[in-house]
Amino acid sequence: MNYQNNLEFAQQLDAEDELKQYRDSFFIPQHNSQNAVYLCGNSLGLQPKSAGSYIQQQLRNWQQHAVEGWFQGDEPWLSYHKALLNPLAGLLGAQPAEITIMNSLTVNLHLLMVSFYKPAGKRIKILMEAGAFPSDQYAVESQVKFHGLDPVDSIIEIFPREGEVTLRTEDILSKIAENAEEIALVLFSGINYYTGQLFNMPAIANAAHEAGAYVGFDLAHAAGNVELQLHNWGADFASWCSYKYMNSGPGGISGIFVHEKHFNDDSLDRFAGWWGYRRDKQFLMAQGFEPEVGAQGWNVSTSPIILMAMHKASLDIFEQAGGIKLLRAKGDMLTGYLEFLIKEINLKHGEDLFTIITPSNQSERGSQLSVVCKYRAKETFNYLADNGVIGDWREPDVIRMSPVPLYNTFADVYKAAATLAQSVIDLK
Ligand SMILES: *Cc1c(COP(=O)(O)O)cnc(C)c1O
């Protein structure tokens, strides 16, 4: 793509964009009575305009049917989740039975580690990327301690090479192979939250299995952002959150993936609750836990219908827009345009004022670019915010910007970069 550094070019791309109508499905936050340039969908996706009516619908069902709402009405709550499985399966590359919707992400990582982190003999270690999201680090550390092990000896972190910021796939694979006999679990993010690097999940899954370990992925920054093939890659498990690229509201409901190869494995432990019980016998209230077949057998508690309604409002838009492949194609163009414009600023000043640490290869990233500011980093971030460009800040000098294909425009990207260019002049 030959990009141009002017607003008319950006507007031309917007005019030709076949997904442009979906922006109107979202509330765009306002800045000085104008649409802000919202590039923070990696942290909290925008609110679908339909979310309110989806919630209202369930409030009406509650009002009219009260407890009978579980069984009656146009969308009985007992099976409400079913309408979400197909769209999610499309986003995740999973079979519907491999998914269930529940809890929040960190809680789910804990529940999944109950099943898939089983330290025994020499095989006691968890291998993960260094600099993983803090919640994942805390979860892993506390799981290791729960088994009476010392995190120092039991967690292997993979660091970038000296002078590099992202990880090389070959280094990840060789680290797994080197420690093959001691690794119980490989737990990786799909996309690292800080650098925006998209990892080679199929290669990592293969290497983990060759080492005799389980492999799980944290898809917080990958779900709804990039194409995933969890089933074909053979991942043992995964979890995600729905409030980032999946636009399902602050603290929105999470879900898990468990590969079908584990459906009949009685040796897997799990922390059980009645919502994971065989559906045909759930209300017999019998003694002795019998799990429902499939990921649903990992459910613990009653479905939070209001959270699921918000999730459904958003997933229905993904369906209408034709799924993740089309969205990713536009996303690559948007992110590529942002990259081009940031490089233009550096060219103009003859100096790398802004260094993009996210891989430049499209197959190694999604929508996010992480930009290191050489000078006045925090002031630059504040300048952007004061001028209606909303990214997010990560210590010590990184601004993350994520143009999201469902609701961002090429003109948004142009304005963000023009504001960044102006900050260089105004902050001198
Ligand atoms: C956003 C994010 C979380 C947040 O977890 P919650 O339990 O939803 O608060 C966890 N891990 C990663 C990698 C994240 O990006």
Image: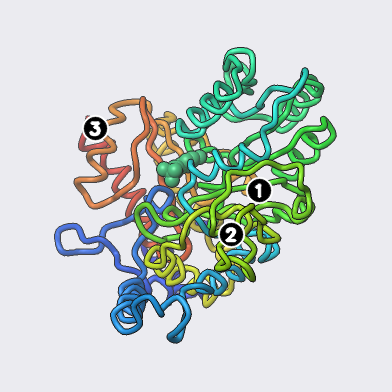
Q: Secondary structure beneath disc 2? A: strand
Q: Is mark 1 within 8 Å of ligand 1?
A: no
Query: Left or right: 50 with respect to 172?
Result: left
For the point 37% across and 62% down, which residue is it? 411
Q: Secondary structure beneath disc 1? A: helix
| Sequence-wise first label, 2 or 3 | 2
**Is residue 409 or residue 121 the one in the foreground?**
121
| Sequence-wise first label, 1 or 3 | 1
Query: Left or right: 116 with respect to 22?
Result: right
Question: Which amino acid, mark 2?
Answer: Thr
Residue 5 percent coordinates (x, y): 42, 54
**Is residue 100 or residue 339 the one in the foreground?**
100
Q: Which mark is residue 379?
A: 3
**Is residue 334 or residue 350 the one in the foreground?**
334
| Sequence-wise first label, 1 or 2 | 2
Quickly name the residue at label 1.
Answer: 363
Quote the CA–CA distance across marks 1 and 3. Answer: 32 Å
Query: Left or right: 276 with respect to 206?
Result: left
Question: Which amino acid, mark 1?
Answer: Ser
Few, some or many residues within 10 Å of mark 1 (<14, 14–19, 20+): few
Quickly name the residue at label 2.
Answer: 100
